[in-house]
Amino acid sequence: MAHQFVREPLRAEEADRLANACRSPEEKLIVWTLLDTGLRVSELCSLTRDNVQWQQRSLRVTGKAGPHGSRRKQRIVPLSARVRAILEPYFALNDAWFVGTRQAQKIVKRVANRAQLAREVTPHVLRHTWATLALQKGISLAAVQKILGHDRLTTTAIYLNLTDGHVLEEFEAKW
């Protein structure tokens, strides 16, 4: 098996600091949506009004599929209350997302610097953070796999690596 680069997820308090460091509505749209959905940055930046299913409180996302993303497949991603609250007014006025992937990456980095996070924070780290926090909150591994759009559970397991600290915290909380 090829070596996989393990991205350390943000801890819950770091994710909160990042979310609170957002100053503009645009920063909130990017950071909060990535933190609360687990979307890939390319999926975020290709969102349109038609992707939002308001009644179902979800997004219909077209993501990559197959080996190396050679095919495309659709999946449903649930929306948190805070993301619904910022997406609704945005898509009431706009049909499509406002920045490309590179600009979204720069905005995440700028907000992370403002939050004074010691590690490098990228949109993919926020995807990893979402997956880890979802698991810690009790969402099943199978549900996380489906939300992330993974074909194989082994792919999801890469995102759900828990640090020793996470394991000890969970044990203490539940044992």
Image: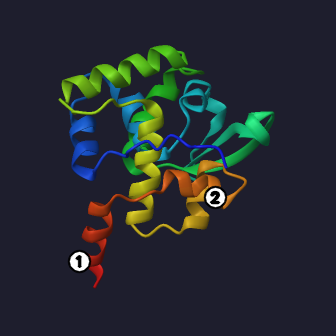
Residue 20 versus residue 158 in the image, above or below: above
> x, y percentage for residue 94?
53, 20
- The numbered disc on residue 172 is 1
> x, y percentage for residue 13?
21, 49
- Which amino acid, by three-letter code, is at mark 2? Thr
Residue 113 versus residue 126 in the image, above or below: above
- How many numbered tags mark residues here? 2
Dot 1 lies on which element? Answer: helix
> x, y percentage for residue 140?
53, 69
- The numbered disc on residue 38 is none
* x 61%, y 57%: residue: 145
> x, y percentage for residue 108?
36, 25
In the rendered image, is residue 26 in sight? Answer: no
Choose the circle earlier in sequence order: 1 or 2: 2
* x 52%, y 28%: residue: 91
Pointer 2 residue: 154
Mark 1 crowd level (few <14, some 14–19, many ≥20, 10 Å Cα): few
What colouring style does the render use?
rainbow
Left or right of 62 on screen, residue 7: left
Marks 1,2: beta carbons within 8 A: no
The Cα atoms of the two marked residues, 1 and 2, are separated by 27 Å
Query: Quadrant where the C terminus lies?
Result: bottom left
* x 29%, y 77%: residue: 171
Left or right of 64 on screen, residue 117: left
In the rendered image, is residue 145 in sight? Answer: yes
Pick the residue in front: 31 or 113.
113
Looking at the image, which residue sits at the far right?
A: 71
- Which amino acid, by three-letter code, is at mark 1? Glu
Dot 2 lies on which element? Answer: helix
Pick the residue in front: 141 or 51.
141
* x 65%, y 50%: residue: 76
Mark 2 crowd level (few <14, some 14–19, many ≥20, 10 Å Cα): few
